[in-house]
Image (cartoon, coloured by chain):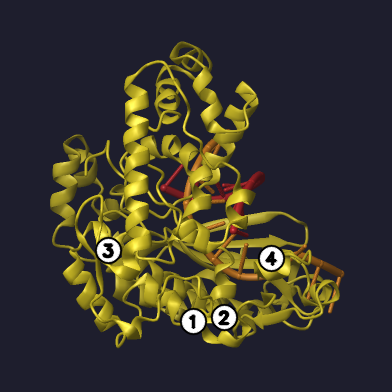
Chain colours: A yellow, B orange, C red
Amino acid sequence: MNADHRVIALIDMDCFYVQVEQRLQPEFLGKPCGVAQYYTWKGGGLIAVNYEARNFGVKRGMRGEQAKELCPDFHVFHVQEVNGKANLTRYRDASADVFRVLNANFKLVEKASIDEGGKAGERVMELFQVEYIGQLRKYSLDALQTSMGEKDGYWLFNLTRGIETTAVNSRNLYKTISASKNFPGKTCLDTIDKIRIWCHNLAEEIFNRLEKDRAENKRRAKLLTVTCTLTTNETIARSCPINEYSIDRFANDTLKILKQYNKNSSTSNIYTPAIINLGISAGKFLDSVNTKSIADLFSKQTTKVETIRSTENTINWQEEDGEEEDNNIEEKVLEKPITTITTLSIQGDFFRKFKKTDEQINTQLKSENKTTTSSITSFFSRYTTNENVLNSSPNKIDDQYITCSKCHKSILMWNMPEHDDFHYAHELQMEENKTNSIIKTSKPIKRKTNKQKINNQTLDSFINKKPKN
DNA sequence: GATCGGCACACT
DNA sequence: GAGTGTGCC
């Protein structure tokens, strides 16, 4: 599959935290739920709300109590607390599970950031007065290039015709690992003792997460950044190098930095101005496998050799991924509209068939009954009560095959809906390519562009839609 | 006396 | 590169 015949799937996990909790307590599936941090202040603050609850007007950011008023049946899951601070480990671990599945089954998995894509998209909408990207087709290459510049205009011209060859970067690790906490009102940190405690608490969390990251990803963070907001409302961020992973070192470095902003006498326990937000962040990750790093440096950037030699101490700092920035901005414009589709398709084995034979799939499905998180299907289907989600019950595997009328391959019966999807996607692509080769746009392919429309579809109707012949 | 915590990224 | 600010979920 080359760049002209590829499928990029964007997976968007809706109210992911809620799903994680529901997976642990399936009795709440289908019911209005949310995940909140902390209990005491008006029932905690909601950081995730499922669709059942959104129907009642419950939104992220609301207080648990307010959600109950809007929706009496609303159930609140509470985020785990460690050292008096919300701890999101459970959701990070679940996210890592998802990425493990994706990485195991796909060549390229990129963690997307739609931030810039969203903004660029809005600019284009504003500029050309269009609502959907397909509407840009009425503009000539010349017109697009005049407004957007030669490069971007050309890219956009192709994009609206389904031509997009930018490589998908294989990157799905965090670039920073951070822990922070607010201390509002009277809870502000106004003494050295309080600050020392919280430096330690945050340092401990960062340490634990960094150790785990080091074991799993064979890399080390090199930079520690301390961020705080004072009662004066100014925010300060200061960094220092990380030489070794150690709770005490993180805590002491953080405290040392904070003490620089204490206007009180160093003999006093009082700290002014008080701290209303404190955070520690670790970044600048480098591979801890040393064997290839030096060689890489020399082969990648011969021009930098001298610099690197002369600054032996900072050799690590030079290596960061210099070249990845260019293509990112471009690719993101495409991402927003596609986002909407993928959450639905994740329920099935939408992808796996492209890489594995049906025989492999069959044996894998069987083994998945015993093993745990080895596929996305098993990840979700164990917990779902919705019969629409495939004919899933994986226990009843008895080698039922259907021959696909299009490709004549033998397909497991319960994989047929997605197999159909494959043909549908392929035909769409071919149709697009055909249309593109004829310069004049004949009849545009009808696309689903409205997020609401897609969200309102049932999973069943999505999976079982038949390719029209 | 309170929309938290945590991520990425652009800008300077 | 360091620090600040923004935006999103």
Task: Identify the disc placed on residue A459.
Answer: none
Marks 2/4 in contact by CB < 8 Å: the verdict is no
Q: What residue does disc 2 label?
A: A22
Question: Label 2 near label 1: C-beta < 8 Å?
Answer: yes
Residue kind at label 3, given as amino acid type? Asn
- Whether tag 3 and tag 2 are in contact, CB under 8 A, the answer is no
Residue at mark 3 to residue at mark 1: CA–CA distance = 22 Å
**Residue bearing the label numbered 3:** A105
For the C terminus of chain A, the image quarter is top left
Residue picked out by circle 4: A262
Q: Pick whichever of labels 1 and 4 is earlier in the sequence.
A: 4
Q: Earlier in the sequence, mark 4 or mark 3?
A: 3
Residue A56, given in percent of the width and then of the height, sits at: 78, 67
Instruction: Tell me the CA gap for discs 1 and 2.
Output: 8 Å
Sequence-wise first label, 3 or 1: 3
Which image quadrant for residue A68?
A: bottom right
Q: Amino acid at mark 1?
A: Tyr
* Label 3 crowd (10 A; few <14 / some 14-19 / many >=20): some
Q: Secondary structure at mark 3?
A: helix
